[in-house]
Image: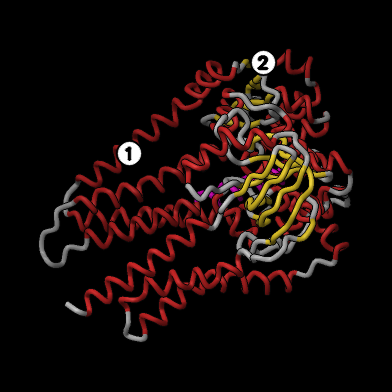
Amino acid sequence: MFRLFFASLVTFGLLLGMAIGLVLAAMVAAGELNLGFAIGLAVVINLIIWLISPWLSDITLRWFNKLEFLDDATVKQRYPGIHALIHEVAGQYRFSAPKIGFIPDRNPTAFTYGLLRSNARIVVTQGIFEFLNEDEQRAVVAHELGHIVHRDFILMTMAGMLVQILYMIFVVLSKAKTSGKKNAGPLIGFLALIAYYIGLYLLLYLSRTREYLADSFSAQRVAPKHLASALVKIAYGIVAIEDTDATQSLLRSTRHLGVVDVKNARYAGLIAESQEKIGGSPAEAMLFDFYNPWAVLVQLNSTHPLTGRRIAHLGKIAKAKGESIGDYDVVAAGEKRGVRRGRLWLRFLAELALLLVPIAIGIVVAASRAPQFVPAAVAGGVLLTLPLRYPFRTPRDATVMALMSDPAASPVRAWPVRLEGKAIGRVNPGFVIGEDVIYQDKTGLMAVDFRSMLGFIGDIFAGWKRVPQHFDQPGDVRGWFKRGMGGYLVLRELNSTAGRLRARPLFWQILVCVIVIAANLYFAHHHHHL
């Protein structure tokens, strides 16, 4: 746990250092107080918003999601285990027991918000009590209590304000009038923009470290296996419950606050539902999360760590306590399968090199004193590597669970595969022109990505007219399997008793490359003869 605290401290320190350094440099470069006044005003506005945000959240959740705060006696009567846990932690850390809010939504989620420990709120949905047993419920609430004990809502608010200040410096200095040859304003503004983008990723990293710390806190209060199973069951519940506008609003608006990231949860939920149907160890399908080097890059844009990585972290805590997390032990599953990190790293480096081939070709062409042909060289490199990233060979028969359980899956090199089953609905339920579908085979569920050669217009038409004809019709689907935040199939062909639906997922990529090459050669030739 000390390592996680240290990582959080260093990350916040980097954000603070970047912000302070660039503020001072920008004020010197600007030679006036306008920037300082703007930053001061931004700080004041952020503090005001922070001060009133809990009550704004209360009003919003009451209005849109029917939030109801339960009095202490009601919590004790309905949920005695949760009540005892909350008062135990509050007493130990000497703050008032947080208010408990209840939302009558079957999607299982929980989150916390507030100003200080003393006025924090923990909100849970009906789904938490529908999908989780009592131990799992206590583990989830303990996770939220961890956020309160660690004052995460204060830390993340301050870190977010620092990132906002970096962007403000860029905006002010980019619009400032230059005077004199030695004006450093534009340079500092550019550095502020770079720091801003770095800051965004540091902010996400900070959020992920706080999630690990909250998991650790929960694992010290309730057996780690209960939070591990809760994470998977919550993901399963989010997938299993039919979406409504109110449900979508709740999940999206609390994505950064919830016990899981809803985007990651949907993929983990498909895994969980698959395991529910065929049994087996859910850890098998999360080997990618823990062992594959791509997983570290995949989660860079996420507020929460990948589910498999969180469960592996809980497994380490359980082992240190002399306990087990059973079927959720990702590390044990990897050892049983004989997963070798060395091989995965070699694959990763080869695939990373594959991505860099077009850039390398462009650099070689530029170095050969023909910089005018760099665009064509890069586009040619993309075409050259396309058959390696999307092999045009006969797809092999596969199952959802076999694909999801392979730790060597990749977001770069796709595998041509064929699944037997049926499309059972849209990836985004209720979106009547949604073209992407959920495909079910005998072992589970997988998202299928449809890409029309007519672009978004073709996607809309297919989602409106063609895709629904194939729902619940047996057949097969062929395409390229890729693994990112979760596994999905890039569609080539969907066959069912309703007919055939074909996609041209690489059409635009090829066309754009050809146009770039042709235009580059034409203009280079035309310029040469002028």
At x 61%, y 35%, the residue is: 428
- Distance from disc 2 to disc 1, alpha carbons, whole Å, reads 36 Å
Horizontal side of residue 477 vs 226, given as left or right: left
Is the C terminus in the top left, top right, bottom left or bottom right quadrant?
Answer: bottom left
At x 70%, y 37%, the residue is: 498
Residue 35 is one of the magenta-drawn residues:
no
Check the image and report above or below for 180 versus 491: below
Mark 2 or mark 1, earlier in chain: 1
Task: Report the residue marked by disc 1.
Answer: 42
Task: Report the residue marked by disc 2.
Answer: 70
Could you tell me residue 368's position as x and y percent?
36, 86
At x 39%, y 29%, the residue is: 48
- Please name the amino acid that badge 1 sits on: Ala
* SS for dot 2: strand
Quick one: 276 or 91, which is closer to the camera? 276
- Which segment did they paint magenta? 203-217
Horizontal side of residue 337 vs 115, given as left or right: right
Could you tell me residue 192's position as x and y percent?
33, 56
- Please name the amino acid that badge 2 sits on: Leu
Main secondary structure along the magenta-highlighted residues:
helix
